[in-house]
Image (cartoon, rainbow, N blue to C red):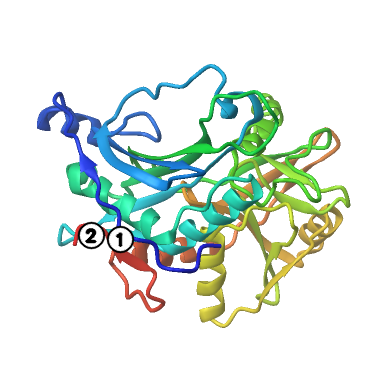
Amino acid sequence: MTTQSAPTLEFQVTRNLAPKTDAERAEILKDPGFGNYFTDHMVDICWSENGGWHRPRVQPYGPIALDPAASVLHYGQEIFEGIKAYRHADGSIWTFRPDQNAQRLQRSAHRMALPELPEEYFLQSLKEAIKVDAAWVPSGEDQSLYFRPFMFAKEAFLGVRPAKKVAYYLISSPAGAYFTGGVKPVNIWLSKDYARAGKGGTGAAKTGGNYAASLLPQAEAYEKGCQQVVFLNEDGNVEELGGMNVIFVYKDGTVVTPKSDSILPGITRASILQLAEDRGHKVESRPVSLQEWRDGVASGDIVEVFACGTAAVITPIGVLKSDEFEDVQPIGELALSLREELTDIQYGRREDKHGWLYRLDA
């Protein structure tokens, strides 16, 4: 983890000579979906073993040139993050707990033998992106600008070792409401044949290989009429969904989230647990077996199950399915209440008691 202050970066800015017109952008922002459109610019910072972090740039969004021998193409040395910018009612632009994303990116980098981007540079990259593309931050209900910071090994060589040349990029994509017509419960497929990550593996790092490993079981889930897949670890304990964390609510008010070294530490999850604790709920992070889940729902001891993540924020789980069973899940009020509270904070409609918001356009 980087602890000492890093020198300030001076970004070179090259404007896109063919940006979207105001009319084109307005049409996109009416219904951007998720990850379908991208802003006019991107941020690029280089790293080398000898030069450290250098050549920070804001440049037109476009293809990245890579040597065919670039290490990332052969050994998957890559990490990424996901974070949003929100336009408040007064027009100002804010993001949510970016220090936590910066620190998680550093932890992911350490696990994948990549250089750790200083927190100051991470925050500066967000602000530099907003300087040139502020008009892309939408103002519609539940809309935001989704940032995708990512880092990869670009050194051209075929030896198996950490790369000595690395690139950090930040691209941005306007995002519409994740749920059209209101939040809907999702059906979950239980994967028994595949694992997302193992003990001592890369599960706690936000790296593309973990998501690649989830794609085949995710396709299986779609075939079974489910929107997400849930994974178990080698001990039969619940880990997480393909791209979201899981939270259980017990009848005594206790809020429980599965604990494992191979689970990605979700920032949305941590925020939700804090808000639940603020309300007086007991919060636990501990192993939860599939049997405890099923028995708890059957007995009424578990009164609510929901998933959470950056994109969807919170969504109730309606059904847990496998080839052997189909368990209807209890739908309660806490998930949607916490979702409303969290999004109200993010959009500036409710007091930010924990100092989670960070202004990007100032």
Horizontal side of 252 relative to 18 (left or right) equals right
Amino acid type, callout 2: His
Q: Which of 265 and 306 is in front in this view?
A: 265
Residue ID at (23%, 59%): 88
In the depicted structure, whether residue 212 falls above or below residue 244: above
Residue 29 location in percent, x, y? 24, 36
- Residue that mark 2 sits on: 88
Residue occupying the far left of the picture: 22
Question: How packed is label 1: few (under 14 Cα within 10 Å), some, or many (20 or more)?
Answer: many
In the depicted structure, whether residue 94 falls above or below residue 251: above
Quadrant of the rendered structure where residue 159 is?
top right
Residue 71 location in percent, x, y? 59, 28
Residue 176 location in percent, x, y? 34, 40
Residue ID at (87%, 47%): 234
- Residue that mark 1 sits on: 347
Q: Are marks 1 and 2 in contact (CB under 8 Å)?
A: yes
In the depicted structure, whether residue 311 falls above or below residue 274: above
Horizontal side of 149 relative to 191 (left or right) equals left
